[in-house]
Image (spheres, rainbow, N blue to C red):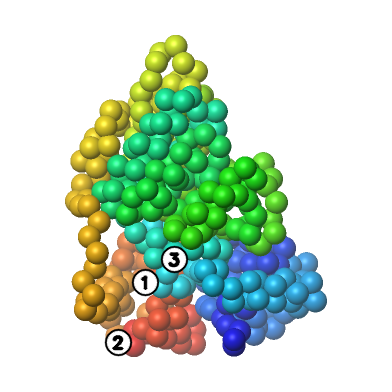
Amino acid sequence: MARDPGLAAWLRLTLTPGLGGAALRELLGRYGLPERVLGAPRAELARHAPGAAIDALDSEAIARQVEHVLAWVEHPGNAVVALGDANYPRLLLETADPPALLYCRGRLELLNRRSLAVVGSRNATAQGTRDAERFARAFSEAGLTIVSGLAQGADAAAHRGGLAGAGSTVAVLGTGVDRVYPLAHAALADQIAEHGLLVSEFALGTRALAHHFPRRNRLISGLAQGCLVIEAALGSGSLITARAAAEQGREVFALPGSIHSPLSKGCHALIKSGAKLVESAEDVLAELGGLERAQPAPAAAAPALPAEPLLAHMGFEPVDVDTLCARAGLSAQRVTAELLRLELAGRVATLPGGLYQRLH
């Protein structure tokens, strides 16, 4: 199977230590596609990114890692989705720090389905576990994909509920997508890879490290229209997810519980701060609105060319990023990401001088 040079370029940039987040966005914003970044003189690149990182770009170690991922992608069900790809989740493009790459195992179409994050305590009570599975199943049967973090307790129950309905489930990992944490969830992870989707922003082989999970939580909320917290103690990771959801402009829901239970205090705190109190699945479905039970798509339906709002702001004259930001009312980060995706789709061309032109 022929290797994808575009993916290889993305991998070289993202696997190079020191080229994360801001540095990578700076280079992409200045040069465009990763291939153009890699084609630029190294001395020039070093003016916009750490010198040690630029030196490592062409190292044998990075080349070996890239080959490992390209070989992994050749296996059925495995994929790497880059920021500019058509499959990249549109909701993540609205967040402050969308990952450049998503490593995936399973059904890629779930990345852009209407979805709800369902999270809760790792030490959930028996009632909390039942609630997580029952609510998640109801949402999945209504057509929502359930997003959670594969942790013990409420997360695992939410995934099981999601798998029981048509909406299925997405598990966002704090490890490489080729690892399972906790190991007790190996069978559940296999089920999700077959019928749902496993997702991680971390490179293959990445172990479970404490600081990865707060980063993972922002993706759980970022992939979904809303976030339901089932049980949470004060200071729990579920509250980190709920705060991320609120910052991302998502709806936040919380299930109330006994005033005597420590696992209710986090949910009660969310409700006091504005989260919507939930007593039934219908409470959430009514707030999100417009949801219907999943229906099979007509066999003869042909995919329509997706509407691209940014193209309407471009017109057909060359335009720069700053002008597009002003016209569309979007951040430079969002506009750059959209332009990359449109260029890969053959709908926009990059011109000299940092200009872009609509093709059709």
Secondary structure of the residue carrying numbered label 1: helix
Q: Which mark is residue 323?
A: 1
Residue denoted by label 3: 108
Q: Say whether disc 2 or disc 1 marks the residue closer to the N-terminus.
A: 1
Q: Is residue 154 left or right of residue 140?
A: right
Residue denoted by label 2: 360
Label 2 is placed on what type of residue?
A: His
Q: CA distance from mark 3 to mark 2?
A: 27 Å
Q: Say whether disc 1 or disc 3 marks the residue closer to the N-terminus.
A: 3
Secondary structure of the residue carrying numbered label 3: helix
Residue 346 versus residue 181: which sits nearer the camera?
181
Crowd around label 3: few <14 · some 14–19 · many ≥20 (10 Å) = many
Residue projecting furthest to the right: 60
Label 3 is placed on what type of residue?
A: Leu
Q: Residue at x 40, y 60 (%)?
A: 110
Q: Quadrant of residue 237?
A: top right
